[in-house]
Structures are given as C-alpha cells and as structure tokens.
Amino acid sequence: MAAQHALWHPFADMGAVDGDRMVITRGEGSYVWDDAGRRYFDATASLWYANFGHGRPEITEAVAKQLQTLDSYNLFGYNANQPAIELADRVAALAPEPGSKVFFGSGGGDVIDTAVKLARAYFAHTGRPEKVHVIGRAQGYHGTHGFGTAVGGIPANAANVGPQPPDFSHVPYDDAAALEAEIERVGPARVAAFFCEPVIGAGGVLLPPAGYLEEVAATCRRHEVLFVADCVIAAWGRLGTWFGIDRWPVRPDMITTAKGITGGTIPLGALVVAPRVAEPFFTGAPGAPIFRHGATYAGHPVACAAGLATLDIYERDGLIPRGRELEKPLADAVSGVSGHELVAEVRAGLGFLAAVELTAEVMDADPGAPVKLQRACRDEGVIVRNLGRGVAVSPPLVAAEPELDLLAAALPKALDRLAAQM
C-alpha cells in the first residue's frame, strides 16, 4: 500500500506507522496534545530532552530577539558570535575541570564523533599516533553517526549497514575488570579512549554498579586512555547535577552533552574538553596543531541564544537538583508493577529516569510486545518509550505528584491490556 505521507520516521516500522501516526500539535509544561485534541503526560520528555517541559516563553523571546540581530553565521576560523562565546564560557564554568574548553555541534551525534576524532588527534599531536583504538560498552548508545554507531553496543543499530570501522571494541557494561582486560588485550599503547554513559539510557536504563565509574576512570588514567563521559542524556538535571557524571568523584577528559542544553527547543550539542586535552591546540605557537573538524551549524547564534535562556531557567527555577530529588518518587511510581506477571525487572532509583523490562517468556512469545505496551500506555494518556525488552520513562523535571500518579496508574492498566492481548 502506498504511503499516505512522505515523512520517514527514525527507528520506525513505516508500514505500521503509516495510518497510525500520533501527530503532536502543541505542548505545555509536562503535557502534549495530539491533532485529535487529546492530552498526554509526556513521560519521556519527548526524547530525554524536554527537561523543563514545553512552551517556555523565555526561549521564544530569546530566539526571536536573536533572529532580529544575527540570524546565523559560522564559527570557522576566526569567526565568532556573542551567544556562542557566552554559552561556551557558562558551560565551561560549570564543568568538573576548571579551564575546560567547549566545542559545539548540532547535536549529540555530532559531539560523539567529535570526541572520537579529538581523542585520536590529541594523541597524534602529542607523539602517540598509534593510539587510535576506542572501547565502548555493551548496550551503550552513542548516537547514529559513523563513529557513534561503531562505539555503541546495541547490535541491532549496526546491522545491515555494512562493516563498521576498525579499531573499535566493546566490554560488558557492568564489569570494570573487563575494561582493564580489554586494554591489556589491545595494548595500552594503542587505546585512545573509553566511552561511558553514567547511566545507560537508550540501551535500557542500566544503572552502574557501586564503584564502577570510579574504577573505570582510574583504569583509564592508569593506562593513559581518555575517559569520555557520554552525558547527552545524563546532563542538565536528569541525574540531579549539571552534567550527570559530576555526581561521582571522577574527572572525565571529555564530556559529551546535548538534548537538555536547550531543553530540546533547538538542536545543539557541546563537547566539554578538559584542559589537559585541549592544551596542545591552544598554545598559539607557530605550527601548533589545528583540529580540522566542525559542523556547519556549530555554535549557531540562535541555538546558543536558546541555550543561554535555558541555563537561566535551570538556575532561576532550581531545576537541576530535581533529578535527584524526584528519583525516589519516580521509583515509587513504577515499582507498583514489579510483581506483575509480565514484568521481569523495574530499574529506577538513580536520577529521573526508569525502565520496566518484560519477561523473557513475553519477549519470546511476541518480540513486538514493548511497542504494544507503549501503545497501551498511550491509550491511558501517558507517553512512554519502547526500548529493547520493555519501556522507559524520563519525565520533565517540572513533573510533580499528579503526573507521577498518572504514570503509576497507567502502567498496570497497560500491562493488563498487554496480558489480555497475549
């Protein structure tokens, strides 16, 4: 059957989507409305990013004002714009490492690929060009750009698109000793970087074991491997701190961030680079290395104006700590289904995100069960996200008790509906 519209959705079975689209027409606070006028609790903050909800007039005003003065200009070479300068300075001032630098991109995928290239360039320009190997984690998600797909650890995302780049490998997501073993196997002289989400997001909301992040960070430092904290999801309050990784006493060499930096209002990504990695590129000496990399829209003045207004909202409304303050209420809201016959595990309690995983028996009987569960929740007025073997939630930081009550009521009803279907 011919498609009804030309729009091709990411990560979608287009044969199933066509004729069953949920067209979102407006948003306000923690809620969105579809084209039939029905209201939904946006329990995913769209795609992990609407941290302060929807419909903030401050962002509209900042964007409109910037469009009236400088609508666009690139950052290549000597070019700059005031919003990009100001936002970079504010982000760097929040970073765990004083003196950090900020390299902008158009989103998370951009800054992941930037981090891979910069890790290799750093070692090339400090006399160790053989350090090119990059290690990721099983179930890790680092976007869908070329290097991001390779360092990610979700096999389905790399299937059917041909061979992946060489010099990438993966270790279990919860075994710090496995990283040490993999570095030794490859050879410390060849390993450039290790990519690690503080809490794995799209791979299923997988929480780190106690002490894990501290141990892998120490392993990286011991072997002169750059520790890259992928905080595209974890940052901007999702885990209750500015970057997510700063909830632990570790000092990443690079932090990738995007999504919540503008609350999702305009695409923007930022790579935060510790001074020890940035230094070779900032000497000003004749013949100093140039990082020959950049996106056309990196540091776009309108996006950076939105980012500045976003930081103002986080600070003024005290939203950043809410990711930690709300983690127990969210865990309580989802824990009610832990004993359901279809549920294998509920993961929550670290930041404002959670997952409900279905049993192996359910998945064996119907691999499409997570999508059906997502749709059943939608019928109950709550938007969740199907992920792997279940569904995940990551509500806006402005969500409160009434919204969590909606979620707590919707999940068991949706699971009962799924059980009836099966």
Image (tube, helix red, strand yellow):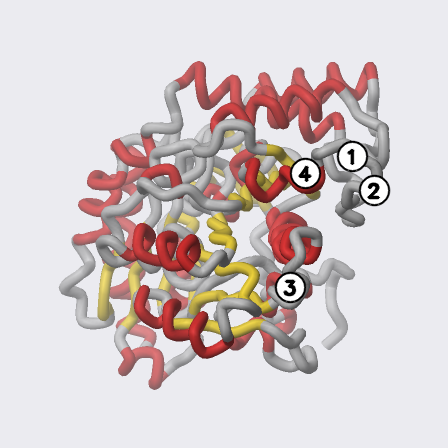
Quarter of the picture holding the C terminus:
bottom left
What is the x, y in percent for residue 307? Answer: 61, 27
Q: Earlier in the sequence, mark 3 or mark 4?
A: 4
Q: Residue at horizontal 66%, vertical 35%?
A: 266
Q: Is residue 284 visible?
A: yes
Question: Gap in Å between the C-alphas at discs 1 and 4?
Answer: 24 Å
Numbered label attached to residue 287: 2
Numbered label attached to residue 171: none
Q: Earlier in the sequence, mark 3 or mark 2?
A: 3
What is the x, y in percent for residue 217? Answer: 38, 53
Numbered label attached to residue 285: 1
Q: Earlier in the sequence, mark 1 or mark 4?
A: 4
What is the x, y in percent for residue 413? Answer: 26, 57
Q: Is residue 109 visible?
A: no
Q: Are marks 1 and 3 in contact (CB under 8 Å)?
A: no
Question: Gap in Å between the C-alphas at discs 2 and 1?
Answer: 6 Å
Q: Amino acid at mark 1?
A: Ala
- Give the labeled residue for mark 4: 104
Q: Left or right? Give the position of 160 relative to 176.
A: right
Q: Which numbered mark, 1 or 3, is in the foreground of this view?
A: 1
Within the image, what quadrant is residue 401 found in?
A: top left
Q: Earlier in the sequence, mark 1 or mark 3?
A: 3
- Does 239 appear above or below 157? above
- Give the labeled residue for mark 3: 147
All told, the count of numbered labels is: 4
- Does 296 appear above or below 284? below
Residue at the bottom extreme, as displayed:
364
